Image (cartoon, helix red, strand yellow):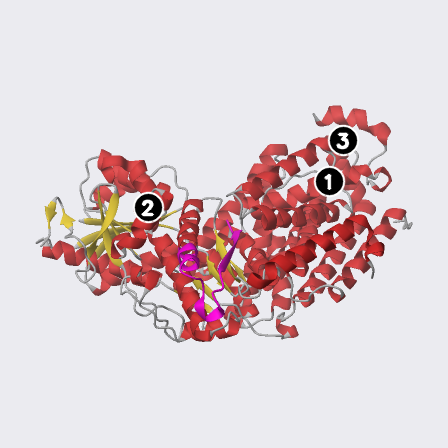
Amino acid sequence: MRFALKPGHVVLLLFFIAAALLPLFVDPRGHLLRVAAMALLFAAMAQSWNIVGGLANQISLGHAAFFGLGAYTSTLLFLRLGISPWIGMLAGAMVAGIAAALLSVPTFRLKGHYFALATLAFAEVLRVIANSWADLSGGPVGLTVPFLGTQPLSFAFRAVSSYYWIILALLVIVCVVFYVLAHGAMGYRLRAVRENEAAAEVAGVNTFRVKLVASVISAALTAMCGTVFAQFTFFFDPDSIFSLSGISVRMAMIAIVGGLGTLGGPIIGALFLIPLEEVANAYLSSRAAGLSQLVFGLILIAAILIQPRGIMAFFPKSRVKTPPKAQPATEGARG
Amino acid sequence: MTVATLGRRGALAALLGAGLFAAGAPIAARAADDVVIGVIQPLSGPNAQFGIGSLRGIELAADTINAAGGIKALGGAKIKLVTADVPTPNTAAAATQRLISQNGVSAVIGAFVSSTTLAASEVTERAGIPLVTFAFADQITGRGYKYVFQVSPKGTVFGKAQFDYATEIAKAAGEKIDKIAILYEDTAYGTAQAKGLREAAKAAGVEVVMDEAYPLGITDVSPLVNKLKASGAQMAFPVSYLNDGLQIIRALRQQNIDIPVVGGAAGYIIPDFKKGLGDYAEGVLSVAAASGDLIPEVAAEYKKKYGTFITHEALIHAAALDAVVQAMEKAKSSDPEKVRAELASLDYCKGFAQGVPGGCIKFDANGLNASAFPVFVQWRGDEPVTVYPPKAAKQKPIWRGKTVE
């Protein structure tokens, strides 16, 4: 792997530094910091999704499954056994990784829409289980993370800024993992799978193994985001944590609007969509029912129509992509 | 800074401002600042009609209080409502935080749906802002939180009342109940109420021949209804929001199954129930947290303003706002900490509190309104009427077509 500092990387580094300094300049208990924290968390989630969705073009609409597994694993371990959510976060990542591996066996033979539907169903199954198996999950009432004041070892803080920095650190980790995967041998194999799976197989790529590794890593990172979400919001229930529109679709949407398969895409997508949604809610939700969602939806449609390849396409040099001359052939083969 | 450095537009604005200030000063000096109260309700999404009804109740209460001179202890300060739409629990935390830090609310009222209220309460508790709610789930006041207040009884209490009242009415009508059926949607509200029903049946030695959860948004209820028919239950207790409730009643009536149905509030007692079912609605019983006929003047006012009868969520939320205002009157302050202290010791039996069965708002150590109890309403024509227990009833209940004395 060859590392060269490109302008895009400088921008990203500057962004991380600026983001790290933000809590020093805004109200540490305020609304702005909470929205910023959620935007960074969704950026991390979308980046995790981007590993399979972007690099291998396996469009998953069920990543809420791993997100929820992360939240449930750490919270249940803490509530039932008193195990710190920090350890629970790793346990959740393992559980989600195993789930992803098991799910891969039947689903990776599926293509396109069929794969998306299978992943969607998986998250729905977990939602139903969490709702009905109340002895294990606490049932439809959901789980409350106890309010402990500031106890760093138990992943509990009074200030929003503490959570904000943890979320930022998680985003940096996910971005580094994505970068390493995208630029290493793994990245080439994944892109080979994306462009033409049969050709990749013929060229000696073990496509099943490549996709398996990518989806396990993606699921584990998503689960870690789930733990952080549970700790940050203190409450979740099966319908919200395994939500199709609230989590699964949103992860994919952020990556797609930002720029599928790019390093900066999920970050730009999240920084665009999450605050936009919040602003729409703040100014419109009290005027007419559903108006804020309508406006948000219209802006989303406009964004996709104006630039279907995502916001990152406005910065062509930073795109992670195959050489242009390979495009026509692969387009044909894919269809 | 002189006028010259401001530029022309700035100077104009400064002049205008000075003029306005001079003109408004004599009056403005006497009028107190508005008191800002946050409202979180599901105004979009599947629970929108309940959220909109709740918001109307709160607006009615705010208008009534403002028209009567505002908050007297604060120099006639007017109530200013700031509303946020919270269709799902995921949106509740950010919206509540926004009301607290952007709008500086003194208290928050909402959010009808139990899970959304639980999520919002995590924010209000940490920020030290009182949250007064109508949501049912037992967990809301079961966590030892200091800043959350529940105006109506808990979900399990509703479930128990749903069973106890129904069997008492049946007994008075000369029918002994041995077998019942429970159908509930698998939400926080449905499961809590089903639990209360189940335990009450067990305590009374009545067999639950069908105990079935179904998902919210169920589209085909015929398996449920067939099972109910075959179960031999003498009475059915569905706990559901609107659409599932409509389907269940319609399917029962269309198949000429005449076993009495006792609904679990929510969808069974809103105007859309009658709209969706027409004559099939007649005689359906339901448990309720409040009813318009307990406070006729307010009910008439509401009907004049919004064109439908006042629902229990509108009434209870109006009472919630009134409770906050009373706490401010007693505290002579809108400081959240002082408002909380006065809410905790409130004993208020006037105004909108009269619409709550029991007629009062008085919170216990957990923040639960200890004086409130559920009532039974029964559909008569276009409106549900309070029929049970006798201390609150306005008319006699009808059981299998006969009036029960």
In magenta, the rendered stretch is: B61-87
Q: Residue at x 25, y 47 (%)?
A: B384
Image coords of residue B76 (percent x, y): 47, 65
Q: Does mark 1 fall on the same chain as mark 2?
A: no
Image coords of residue A310 (percent x, y): 74, 38
Write down the quadrant of residue A316 in the picture: top right
Q: Is residue B231 magenta?
A: no
Q: Tell me if mark 3 has few (under 14), some (14-19) or many (20+) residues whose alpha carbon lies within 10 angstroms of its own.
A: some
Q: Secondary structure at mark 3?
A: helix
Q: Nearer the viewer, residue B283 or A136?
A: B283
Which label lies toward us, 1 or 3? 1
Q: Nearer the viewer, residue A16 or A159?
A: A159
Q: Nearer the viewer, residue B204 or B271?
A: B271
Q: Amino acid at mark 1?
A: Leu
Write down the quadrant of residue A249 in the picture: top right
> Vertically, is A308 above or below A36?
above
Q: Tell me if mark 2 has few (under 14), some (14-19) or many (20+) residues whose alpha carbon lies within 10 angstroms of its own.
A: some
Residue topped by disc 3:
A199
